[in-house]
Amino acid sequence: MIEKAKKDPQRRAAFITIIFLTAAPLITPFSIPLQDLTGEDIIQKVDDLMSTQTAYAKMKMTIETTSGQKRTFLYESWTKDEGEKNLIRYLEPSRVKDQAVLMLNNANDIWMFFPRTQRVRKLATHAKKQKMQGSDFSYEDMGGSGEFEEDFESERLQDEQKNGHDCYKVELIRKPESNISYSRLLIWVIKENFYPIVIEYYDEEDPTYLQKTLTQSDIEVIDGIPTAKKMVMQNLNDQTQTVMEVVEIKYDVELDDRMFTERSLKR
């Protein structure tokens, strides 16, 4: 059972947007001495990790409820333009087979296709905050491009060990002009390769209230790109969790822009 989050005025908070995975080209050494890196330097490298132009993945998503029941989905995902364009199509279970979600402009524009009615419906802008298939990942989590520098001010905190890795710890505070759904984020980044392995998401209005924690593990280099093959999002409000596992992944695949249109959802 996941321990429920409590409001604690001594805790501060933070956020991250994830695509269906976090991936990046292998990184060349940073020219600045590591001990002198600022929060902005570290987050710039994390942003660089998400710069893959195109990717295809087959993903297994398992949702665990408060009662311990599990629901599993299998879906395919295509992303283009560094995650700005995202298409998800479900394969299993049968009740959602061929259902599809198109997310553009960092999930500010979302369309859903329902195979039983053969209809495409555009969701309201606020729908990006909703849970995808009842999981602990929102549409914004899945469809954002991860441009931390654009949306957050960053500050390097004291370095820490996390999950067996020497990590930088960085706090991100949402900029006033940003429309991101989280006020604050704490992120632990592996020093060796600038890979983010733990991310804490905080309430949109209350930066002291921890909502969710993302843990990324089983990191493998695939096609020259470090890839987390397992991602666990724990929802401390609802005491639930969702596990994402990579079944198959390919990078730098050819993707036609026509895939990412309302008309293509019906294919």
Image (cartoon, helix red, strand yellow):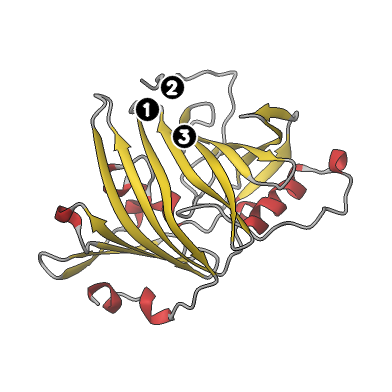
Is label 3 or label 2 in front? 2
- 233, 16: nearer the viewer: 233
Q: Is residue 130 visible in the rendered structure shown here?
A: no
First in sequence, mark 3 or 2: give its number. 2
User: Label 2, on which residue?
Assistant: 5
Q: Is residue 170 left or right of residue 55?
A: right
Residue 242 position (above or below residue 26): above
Within-10-Å neighbours for mark 3: few <14, some 14–19, many 20+: some
Q: Residue at x 49, y 41 (%)?
A: 182
Residue 23 position (above or below residue 119): above
Q: Amino acid at mark 3?
A: Asp
CB contact under 8 Å: marks 1 and 3: no
Q: Position of residue 112 (x, y in %)?
A: 26, 63
Question: Is disc 2 placed on a helix, strand or loop?
Answer: loop
User: Label 1, on which residue?
Assistant: 237
User: Label 3, on which residue?
Assistant: 203
Q: Position of residue 46 (x, y in %)?
A: 66, 51
> What is the distance, in whole Å, between disc 1 and disc 2 at their CAs?
6 Å
Is label 1 or label 3 in front? 1
Q: Residue at x 54, y 42 (%)?
A: 218
Q: Amino acid at mark 1?
A: Asn
Q: Quadrant of residue 120?
A: bottom left
Q: Position of residue 136 (x, y in %)?
A: 36, 39
CB contact under 8 Å: marks 1 and 2: yes
Residue 95 position (above or below residue 7): below
CB contact under 8 Å: marks 3 and 2: no
Question: Is disc 1 placed on a helix, strand or loop?
Answer: loop
> What is the distance, in whole Å, between disc 1 and disc 3 at their CAs?
10 Å
Q: Is residue 213 visible in the rendered structure shown here?
A: yes
